[in-house]
Image (tube, rainbow, N blue to C red):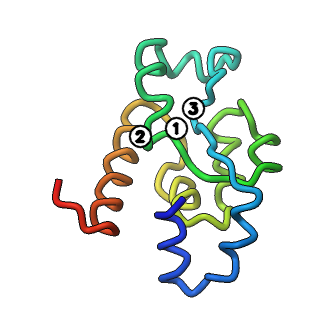
Amino acid sequence: ERLNEYELITSSQVKKIQYMHSTLQIEHILPQKYNKVAKWIEEWNEDDAELWMHRLGNLVLLNQKLNSKISNGHFVEKIKHYKSSPYPMTRRISDSYLEKWTLDEVKDNHFYVLDFAKCVWGLAV
């Protein structure tokens, strides 16, 4: 959440922050119930899904209404909604990953988010 606020502040969108707090939810791009959707089952094995599902690279912010709407949908459907998100790091997913959300994309995004956090908070890790 703080990383998205930083992005909004630096892009002069401070007024949006207060409203967003009241409707904010964490969205799992690879859903927690991925094994109920055939497309996800084709792309993910159980071990990798369990290992990466709750890591930063698979998480984005969405408002409650949209999160409920897209729920366990497949990635190709989800990114259509990410494009209109007020959260910069959520929009980044729709700009950076266009066709699939597999282990490679999750890892790539995970390390991007970690590097961004280190930069924003001045961490030397």
| For residue 63, above or below residue 21 | above
Question: Would you name the residue on which mark 3 appears?
Answer: 30
| For residue 98, above or below residue 53 | below
Disc 1 residue crowd, few under 14, some 14–19, many 20+, Cα 10 Å: few
Q: Nearer the viewer, mark 2 or mark 1?
A: 2
| 14 left or right, relative to 54 | right
Q: Disc 1 to disc 3, how far (Cα)?
A: 11 Å
Question: Would you name the residue on which mark 1 appears?
Answer: 100
Q: Of helix, strand and loop, which one carries label 3?
A: loop
Counting from the top left corner in percent of width and height, residue 23 is at 76, 57
Specify the amino acid type for callout 1. Answer: Lys
Mark 2 and 1 residues: CB-CB less than 8 Å, in contact? yes
Counting from the top left corner in percent of width and height, residue 94 is at 57, 55
Disc 2 residue crowd, few under 14, some 14–19, many 20+, Cα 10 Å: some
Q: Nearer the viewer, mark 1 or mark 3?
A: 3
Question: Would you name the residue on which mark 2 appears?
Answer: 105
| For residue 57, above or below residue 124 | above
| For residue 20, above or below residue 39 | below
Q: Of helix, strand and loop, which one carries label 1?
A: loop
Instruction: Judge by depth and name the residue closer to the eye, 38 or 63.
Output: 63
Identify the image quadrant of the N terminus.
bottom right
